[in-house]
Image (tube, helix red, strand yellow):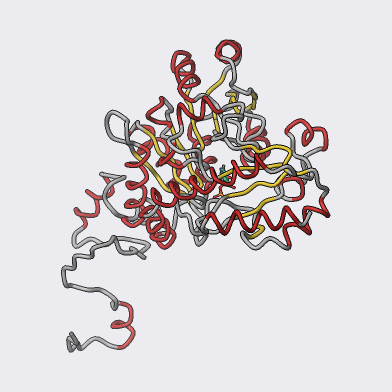
Amino acid sequence: MNIKSKKQFSTLCAQSGKLSQQIHPHQTPVYATAAFEFDQLTEGTNAFLSQPGTHVYSRYGNPTVEAVAESIANLEGMGVDGQTYAVMTGSGMAAIHLVVQALCRPGDVILTQEDLYGGTTELFFKLFKPFGVDLLTSDFAEEMDLTKLLNKFPIRLIYLETPTNPMLNCVDLEMVCQVATKAGVMVVVDNTFNTPYITRPLALGADLVIHSTTKFIHGHGYSTGGVVVGKSKELIMEKIWTVLKLNGSILSPFEAMLIQIGVKTLGLRIKQQSFNANQLAKYFQEHPKVKKVNYPGLPTHPHHRIAQKQMNAFGAMLSFELDLNLGEIESMLSGLGIGRIAPSLGEAETMIMHPASMSHLRMPEDQKKKFGITEGLIRLSIGLEDVEDQLDAWDSALRAV
Ligand code: PLP
């Protein structure tokens, strides 16, 4: 409707873009606004007094971002008594940084794994160690060893990934959470590889879950984001939210919309991608040219029993080893009719990563040897391509080497 106004050109420009009509969108729109306005000062004061929850400024809270936070909190909260809460960040790294910044102080120790995502290890070493937050590692295999470590060092939090990258080692979350709870130590789980379709660490006793939503949760590779989920309102909506508001590592509402689209099909995608990965893992295991397959769904995997206990499906990530050098791997992959070489995971298309020449390139040789990062090791994030096409593509590629 064109309402005639006596106002001049630039006033009309500045005041433009506002709908007075009440609308009822079926999906949460992208609230692309930096600030929220008030008819009266008292309304503004009340909104500031009830932060977070009401809307004043998008760094403090944005409805599109909150909608996706709630979606993920609900999924991670299945099987948990009571409500769960979540805040979104601009990347997975920002989520990890946020948690450590909110919880750790100089003198605290983080107990974690040696084979953590490389970026997380680098973050702990380069950004937190200089501020007096120390790092200790364990394989979390034995309850007794864990108890001893917790009694001996000023451990503030346990930070875990299961399965790990790229060897897909699994940690018994229930055991670790029970020991940690007894010792009054918090457990934070990076659930990026599994998603809540597969494992819900909060229901197993963890205090916080983080994700790089860049991966399976969004699932299509068009967005970067992160999330922190927990059971304590005070921890998420006061302590962690306050740090997020002040460090400003927030998610944009445009990214939130993209992530929300991904969440709608998360169950279907993970179910199918896990099925495809299972088929491929079995195929690779039978293949005479394959030396080793790392997939927690295989009964031969050293942590298969742990995986059976805490995973509803065995996931879309696997790695396998061939007796080939870098050049041979390169020529095999260049003829492969499926998947793309890319340093990420969790998308609809299969993604191929060669740890020795990509993610673990800078790792010292002795460390690579220790973790089994050989030139013949390939990591796959299995996609939604028909599994028959995937098997055909690998069959031809392996026949040619
Ligand atoms: N956690 C895991 C397990 C990852 O694989 C990654 C990135 O690859 C991250 C966290 C960091 O996420 P982002 O790249 O969204 O910052």
One can see residue 72 in this view: yes
Quadrant occupied by the N terminus: bottom left
Horizontal side of 344 relative to 356 (left or right) equals: left
One can see residue 248 in this view: no
Q: Quadrant of residue 334?
A: bottom right
Is 237 or 290 nearer to us in this picture?
290
Residue sitting at x 36%, y 51%: 68
Residue sitting at x 60%, y 31%: 169
Horizontal side of 142 relative to 65 (left or right) equals: right
Check the image and report above or below for 298 versus 283.
Answer: above
Is 281 or 71 nearer to us in this picture?
281
Image x and y of residue 359, in percent: 70, 47
Image x and y of residue 276, in percent: 52, 49
Q: How many marks?
A: 0
Check the image and report above or below for 264 versus 227.
Answer: below
Residue sitting at x 51%, y 52%: 214
Q: Quadrant of residue 43?
A: bottom left
Residue sitting at x 33%, y 63%: 31
Image x and y of residue 24, in percent: 19, 65
Image x and y of residue 73, in percent: 35, 42
Quadrant occupied by the C terminus: bottom right
